[in-house]
Amino acid sequence: MRDKNQSAKIFGHVLREQRLARGYTQDKLAELAKVDRSHISSLERATRSPLIPTLFILADALNISASQLIELVEQRLKSGQ
């Protein structure tokens, strides 16, 4: 069974990398996703885990599919990063 905290931490890293790869600030991603900037910050710091609807909203704002976002997290979990 996977460690929930590790999954949240890796999700946060992936979210941050995807955001920065597009040149987005937390404010910009929050605006595109229609969520508060503090929510983006909490996800990136792994103090919160995304709900499934939020995952879809964030993926859409990043212009990738939710499955691609999850796959990036899964790859990291499998590689132990």
Image: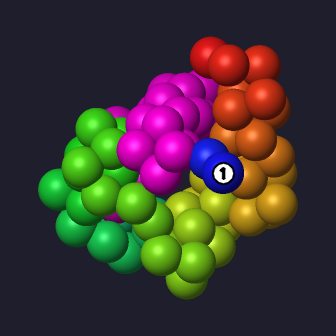
> In the current view of this chain or complex, which residue is farthest to the left?
38
Return the residue nearer the eye: 22 or 5. Answer: 5
* Residue range of the region highlighted in magenta in the rendering: 3-30
Kindly indicate the quadrant of the structure image that contains residue 65. Answer: bottom right
Q: How many labels does the image show?
A: 1
Q: What residue type is labelled 1?
A: Met
Answer with left or right where residue 39 lies relative to residue 23: left
Answer with left or right where residue 29 lies relative to residue 21: left
> In the current view of this chain or complex, which residue is farthest to the front?
1
Asked whether 48 falls inside the magenta stretch, the response is: no
Residue with the mark numbered 1: 1
The quadrant the C terminus occupies is top right
Asked whether 24 falls inside the magenta stretch, the response is: yes
Q: Main secondary structure of the magenta part?
A: helix
Residue 9: x and y in percent read 43, 37
Kindly indicate the quadrant of the structure image that contains residue 55. Answer: bottom right
